[in-house]
C-alpha cells in the first residue's frame, strides 16, 4: 500500500511540460475596462457599427451583474480593471497572406508545441486556424473549403466579409445577458473562429483551431460561432496549451453552435492550459460558456472534452434540444492534479418530442485536486418521449483530493425516461497488483488503468485528438513518460 | 434571505406565550431567545437559497401568527384516534394534541427497566440537564430548527440505559385538530451503549385547515446502539409541515430511518445523520405518494466522518395530479473517512402531465479509499408490465394500481416491525385507486 501511495505521489508530482513563452512585440490597448476601451478594440478591428453597439450593450449589462459564487471553486478576487483586454502581435497588423509572412518566432513556438503548421497542413489534412493571443495568424485549406461554400475564418474576418450571417446568429444561443463571464466576453471578445456549413454539405476535413495565451496579463476572450445549415455536417476540434506563468490569467470564452434541421455538429476540445505549479501558484482561470442549439428537427450536437489543464475550469457545454428527434451528447474527461479545481458538466434541455441525450463524464482527481461534476437534465412538459442516460464516474488517486457530483434532474413530462448513475472509487489496488505481478511497471499500470477508465470518452474523439488526449493524460499524471 | 417587517412584528418575543415549557429555567430561556434572534435575523429562506430551490415557503411568512397555540382537542379527533389505535396494540403510545402531551389518551405503562419515556415539557419545567445539549446552536441544522428551539412546546424524551432492548415500538402520535394552529413538537432520543428500540412518529391532521407543523427530532446513538425510526406524514390537505430528523452515531451503531409522506399540502423533511465514529451503519428509506396539488420535499444528508462507515439510501416517489416531488440526497465523505461504502438511489414514477419531479443525488468526497455510488431514475409504468397483467384478465385501472403498489411496497417492506409494516401497507393501498380490488389480488 505505502509503496503504491509513494509511487503515485511520484507520478503525480511532475511539472508542466509546455511551460515557456515567446517574447514578441505586441500591440496592446491600455489596461482596464471602460466604454472607451471597448470602442478602441472595435476600432482596431475596423468593425461595423452593429458590432460596436452590441459590445456596448453587453458591457452596460455586465456592469449590472455580480460574479457568480455558486461553483465549487475558490480563487482570489479578480480585478477586472487590472487586465489587458486586447493584444495582437504587432508584426501582424494587416494579416499575413501566407506562412512566409508570419513572424518566424511565432512559428518556432508552434513547432516547439509539436504542431508544425506546414506538416499538419500536408500530412494530417487538418485546416488550422491558429489563434496566437488575439489575432488569427494563419489559416490553411481555406480555398478547398471555399469550393464547397464552407466559410471557415477568424471571427473578425467574418464580421467584415459576412456581416449578415454574423448578425443573424451572434448571441442567439448565448445572449449577451446570459451570465457574468459571457457578458464580459460579449463586450470585449478579441477574436475566435467562425464557421458556416451550407445546406447538405458534409465538411470533408476536421476543422481545427489552436488557441494560445501568450502576452503577459492578457485575458483571452475568444468567441466561436459554428452554424450547420440543413443536413450539413461538421466536426470541429479545439486544442490548447499555454506557457508557464506566475500570475493567474483569465480566460472567458464563448462558443455558440447552431444546428438546423438534420444537421450534425461534433465539437471536440483538448484543453491543456497551464494548471499552476505544484503548490497551486499561477495557472489559467478558464470560465467558459459553451452551448449548442438543435434548432431544427433531427439535429444532432455532440460535445467531447478532455480537460487536463487550467488552475480552475468552470465550464458546462450544453445542448438545447428544441427540434423533434434532436440528439445531444456530452463526453468528458476532466483531470485535476496538484491544486487544480474543475467544476464542469453539462445541461441538456429537452423541449422537442422524441429528444435523446447521453452524458458520460469521467473525473480523475490527484494531489489536492478538486473535481466536480455539475449537470442539469431538464425535461419540459411538451417534450414527449424524452430519453436521457447519464453516467458519471470519478477516480481518486491520493487522499488529499476530492470528487463531487451535483446532478440536477427536473422532469415535467410523464413520458420521459431519465436515468442517472454515478460512482466514485479509488484506483483499484487489486488491479494495480494484477498488473505489477505480471511485470508491468507501476507507472505504466496506472496509465493503463486510467486510460481504460476513460476509454469510452476517447472513442468519441477524432483520431488525431484521441492520440494527443491519451498522451496528455499520461503526461499530466506521470511526470513525462507518456 | 430578507426579513419581512411584518414577520418580526408577529414574532415579538415578548408576545411569546408564557406557557412555553421551561420558561422559568434560565438556560431554556436563553436558548429560546438566542434561537429566536437567529431566526429573526435570517427570516424564511427563499427559492434563491440553493437548499430551498424547489420549495417555496414564503406563504408561511403571511400567516396571521407563527406563535404556538394551545387549542383544546376537537371531539372528532378522539374518534379518529380510536380508529387508528385499535390496530396498534402492543406499542407504547404517547399522544400529543396540537403540540401538547395528552396523558389521558396515552398508554406508556409497562415500560421495561432502563427505559424512561417522558414528556419534554415536563423535563424542561423540571430543569433537567439531559435536553440541554440538544438545544445547542451546533445542533441546529436549518433555520426552522432555530424557530423550533424558540417555540418548542412539547414532545417525547426517550432515554435508553446501556444494553436496554425495547421490543414494542414507541409510538408518538401528533394530532393537529384545531383550525390554523401552529405546533412545534420536539423529540429527543438518547440511546445508551448497545441499546435497541423502534420508534414511530405519526403526524395526523384531523381538519382541513392551514395548520403549520415545525417538528424536530434529535437522536443520539451510543456505541453499538440500534435505533429504527419511522415517520408517517398524514396531515390535512391544506397543512404545511416542515420537519428535521437528526441522528448522531457513535462507534458501531446503526440508525435506520423510514419516511412515508402521504399527506400535507406542503411538506419538507430534512433528515441528517452524522457517522462520528468508526463502523457505523446508516440506512435511509423513503416513500412519497403525491396527488392533487401536493408538494413534498425530502432533503437528506449523510456525513461520513470516520472510517469504515456504511450507508444505504433508497427513496421512491409516485407523483400524480399536479403534485411536485423533490428529492435532494447529499452524501459527504470527509477526509479520513476511509473504507466508506455508500450507496444511494432515487427512483420516481411520474404519472401525470401536470406533475413534476426534481431529483438531485449529490456526492461530495474528500477521501480516496471509498466506494460510493448513486443512481436516479424518472419514468412511468412499463407498458409491457401493464400488458402482462391485462392479458391475464386484470382491468387497466387495477393493473396500474397493482404496479404502483409493487413499486411503493419495496420501501414499505423494509420496515422490520410486522404490525407497523402491515399498517403502512394498508395506508398505501388506501391511497391507490381501486385499492380494495387489488387487495384481493395480493
Image (spheres, coloured by chain):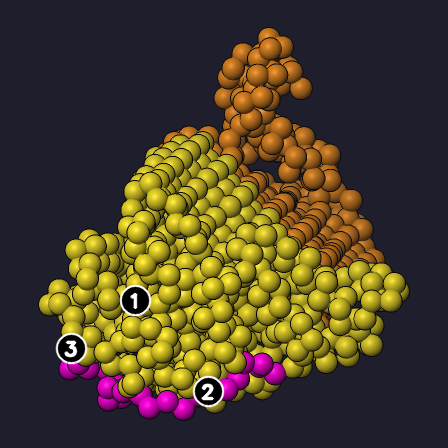
**Tag 3, which chain?**
A
The chain displayed yellow equals A
Q: Percent position (x, y) of residue B377?
A: 55, 41
Please tell me which of labels 1 and 3 falls first in the chain: 3
Q: Which residue is mark 3?
A: A43
**Tag 2, which chain?**
A
Question: Badge 1, how many Cα within 10 Å: few under 14, some, many 20+?
Answer: many
Q: Residue furthest left?
A: A49
* Range shown magenta: A15-40
Q: Which residue is mark 1?
A: A154
Q: CA distance from mark 1 to mark 3?
A: 17 Å
Q: Percent position (x, y) of residue B349?
A: 51, 34
In the rendered structure, are the residues bearing label 1 and label 2 in contact, judged by CB atoms less than 8 Å apart?
no
A16 within the magenta span:
yes
Q: Is residue A476 above or below residue B273?
A: below
Q: Main secondary structure of the magenta part?
A: loop
Q: Quadrant of the N terminus of chain B?
A: bottom left
> Which residue appears at 21% of the width and 54% of the height?
A165
Q: Quadrant of the C terminus of chain B?
A: top right
Q: Which residue is mark 2?
A: A21
Residue A469 appears anywhere in the view: yes
Question: Badge 2, how many Cα within 10 Å: few under 14, some, many 20+?
Answer: some
> Which residue appears at 73% of the width and 39% of the height?
B417
Name the element at disc 3: helix
In the rendered structure, are the residues bearing label 2 and label 3 in contact, judged by CB atoms less than 8 Å apart?
no
Q: Mark 1 against mark 3, which lies toward the viewer?
A: 1
Colour chosen for chain B? orange
Name the element at disc 2: loop
Amino acid at each position: 500500500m505505502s509503496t503504491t501511495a509513494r509511487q503515485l505521489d511520484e507520478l503525480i508530482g511532475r511539472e508542466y511540460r509546455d511551460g515557456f513563452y515567446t517574447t514578441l512585440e505586441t500591440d496592446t490597448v491600455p489596461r482596464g475596462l471602460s466604454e472607451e476601451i471597448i470602442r478602441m478594440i472595435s476600432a482596431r478591428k475596423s468593425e461595423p457599427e452593429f458590432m460596436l453597439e452590441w459590445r456596448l450593450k453587453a458591457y452596460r449589462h455586465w456592469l449590472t451583474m455580480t460574479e457568480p459564487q455558486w461553483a465549487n471553486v475558490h480563487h482570489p478576487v479578480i480585478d477586472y480593471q487590472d487586465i489587458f483586454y486586447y493584444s495582437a502581435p504587432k508584426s501582424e497588423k494587416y494579416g499575413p497572406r501566407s506562412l512566409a509572412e508570419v513572424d518566424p518566432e511565432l512559428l518556432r513556438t508552434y513547432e516547439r508545441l509539436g504542431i508544425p503548421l506546414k506538416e499538419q497542413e500536408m500530412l494530417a489534412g487538418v485546416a488550422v486556424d491558429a489563434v496566437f493571443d488575439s489575432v488569427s495568424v494563419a489559416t490553411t485549406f481555406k480555398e478547398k473549403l471555399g469550393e464547397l461554400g464552407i466559410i471557415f475564418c477568424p471571427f473578425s474576418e467574418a464580421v467584415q466579409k459576412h456581416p449578415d450571417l454574423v448578425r443573424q446568429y451572434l448571441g442567439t444561443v448565448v445572449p449577451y445577458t446570459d451570465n457574468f463571464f459571457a457578458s464580459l466576453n460579449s463586450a470585449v471578445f478579441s477574436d475566435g473562429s467562425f464557421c458556416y456549413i451550407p445546406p447538405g454539405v458534409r465538411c470533408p476535413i476536421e476543422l481545427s483551431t489552436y488557441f494560445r495565451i501568450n502576452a503577459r496579463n492578457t485575458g483571452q476572450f475568444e468567441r466561436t460561432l459554428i452554424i450547420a445549415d440543413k443536413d450539413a455536417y461538421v466536426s470541429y476540434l479545439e486544442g490548447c496549451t499555454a506557457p508557464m506563468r506566475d500570475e493567474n490569467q483569465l480566460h472567458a470564452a464563448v462558443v455558440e453552435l447552431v444546428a438546423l434541421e438534420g444537421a450534425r455538429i461534433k465539437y471536440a476540445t483538448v484543453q491543456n492550459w497551464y494548471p499552476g505549479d505544484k503548490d497551486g501558484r499561477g495557472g489559467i482561470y478558464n470560465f467558459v460558456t459553451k452551448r449548442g442549439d438543435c434548432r431544427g428537427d433531427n439535429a444532432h450536437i455532440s460535445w467531447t472534452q478532455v480537460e487536463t489543464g487550467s488552475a480552475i475550469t468552470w465550464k458546462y457545454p450544453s445542448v438545447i434540444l428544441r427540434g423533434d428527434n434532436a440528439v445531444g451528447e456530452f463526453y468528458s474527461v476532466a483531470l485535476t492534479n496538484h491544486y487544480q479545481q474543475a467544476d464542469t458538466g453539462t445541461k441538456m434541455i429537452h423541449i422537442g418530442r422524441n429528444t435523446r441525450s447521453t452524458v458520460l463524464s469521467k473525473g480523475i482527481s490527484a494531489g489536492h485536486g478538486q473535481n466536480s461534476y455539475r449537470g442539469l437534465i431538464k425535461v419540459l412538459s411538451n417534450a414527449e418521449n424524452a430519453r436521457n442516460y447519464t453516467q458519471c464516474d470519478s477516480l481518486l488517486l491520493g487522499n488529499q483530493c476530492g470528487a463531487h457530483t451535483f446532478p440536477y434532474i427536473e422532469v415535467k413530462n410523464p413520458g420521459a425516461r431519465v436515468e442517472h448513475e454515478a460512482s466514485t472509487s479509488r484506483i483499484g489496488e487489486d488491479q494495480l497488483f494484477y498488473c505489477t505481478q505480471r511485470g508491468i511497471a507501476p507507472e505504466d499500470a496506472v496509465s493503463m488503468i486510467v486510460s481504460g477508465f476513460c476509454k469510452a470518452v476517447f472513442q468519441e474523439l477524432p483520431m488525431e485528438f484521441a492520440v494527443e488526449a491519451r498522451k496528455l493524460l499520461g503526461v499530466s499524471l506521470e511526470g513525462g513518460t507518456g | 434571505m430578507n426579513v419581512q417587517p411584518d414577520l418580526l412584528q408577529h414574532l415579538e418575543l415578548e408576545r411569546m406565550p408564557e406557557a412555553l415549557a421551561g420558561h422559568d429555567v434560565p438556560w431554556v430561556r436563553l436558548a429560546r431567545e438566542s434561537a429566536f434572534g437567529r431566526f429573526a435575523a435570517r427570516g424564511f429562506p427563499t427559492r434563491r437559497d440553493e437548499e430551498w430551490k424547489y420549495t417555496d415557503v414564503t406563504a408561511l411568512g403571511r400567516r396571521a401568527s407563527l406563535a404556538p397555540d394551545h387549542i383544546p382537542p376537537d371531539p372528532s379527533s378522539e374518534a379518529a384516534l380510536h380508529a387508528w389505535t385499535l390496530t396498534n396494540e402492543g406499542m407504547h403510545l404517547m399522544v400529543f394534541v396540537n403540540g401538547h402531551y395528552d396523558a389521558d389518551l396515552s398508554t406508556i405503562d409497562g415500560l421495561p427497566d432502563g427505559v424512561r419515556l417522558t414528556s419534554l415539557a415536563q423535563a424542561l419545567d423540571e430543569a433537567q440537564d439531559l435536553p440541554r445539549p440538544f438545544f445547542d446552536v451546533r445542533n441546529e441544522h436549518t433555520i426552522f430548527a432555530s424557530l423550533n428551539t424558540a417555540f418548542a412546546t412539547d414532545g417525547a424524551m426517550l432515554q435508553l440505559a446501556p444494553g436496554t432492548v425495547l421490543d414494542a415500538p414507541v409510538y408518538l402520535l401528533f394530532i393537529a385538530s384545531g383550525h390554523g394552529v401552529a405546533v412545534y413538537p420536539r423529540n429527543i432520543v438518547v440511546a445508551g451503549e448497545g441499546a435497541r428500540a423502534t420508534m414511530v412518529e405519526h403526524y395526523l391532521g384531523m381538519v382541513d385547515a392551514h395548520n403549520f407543523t415545525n417538528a424536530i427530532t434529535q437522536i443520539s446513538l451510543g456505541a453499538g446502539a440500534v435505533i429504527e425510526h419511522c415517520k408517517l406524514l398524514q396531515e390535512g390537505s391544506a397543512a404545511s409541515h416542515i420537519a428535521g430528523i437528526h441522528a448522531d452515531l457513535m462507534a458501531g451503531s446503526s440508525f435506520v430511518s423510514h419516511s412515508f409522506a402521504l399527506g400535507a399540502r406542503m411538506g419538507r423533511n430534512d433528515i441528517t445523520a452524522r457517522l462520528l465514529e468508526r463502523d457505523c451503519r446508516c440506512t435511509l428509506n423513503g416513500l412519497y405518494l403525491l396527488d392533487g396539488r401536493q408538494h413534498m420535499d425530502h432533503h437528506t444528508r449523510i456525513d461520513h466522518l470516520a472510517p469504515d462507515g456504511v450507508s444505504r439510501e433508497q427513496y421512491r416517489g409516485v407523483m400524480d395530479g399536479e403534485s411536485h416531488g423533490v428529492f435532494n440526497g447529499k452524501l459527504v465523505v470527509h477526509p479520513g473517512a476511509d473504507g466508506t461504502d455508500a450507496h444511494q438511489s432515487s427512483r420516481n414514477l411520474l404519472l401525470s402531465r401536470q406533475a413534476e419531479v426534481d431529483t438531485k443525488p449529490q456526492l461530495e468526497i474528500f477521501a480516496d479509499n471509498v466506494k460510493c455510488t448513486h443512481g436516479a431514475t424518472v419514468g412511468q409504468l412499463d407498458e409491457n408490465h401493464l400488458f402482462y397483467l391485462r392479458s391475464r384478465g386484470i382491468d387497466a385501472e387495477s393493473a396500474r394500481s397493482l404496479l404502483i403498489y409493487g413499486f411503493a411496497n419495496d420501501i414499505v417492506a423494509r420496515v422490520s416491525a410486522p404490525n407497523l409494516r402491515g399498517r403502512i401497507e394498508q395506508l398505501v393501498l388506501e391511497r391507490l385507486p381501486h385499492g380494495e380490488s387489488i387487495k384481493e389480488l395480493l
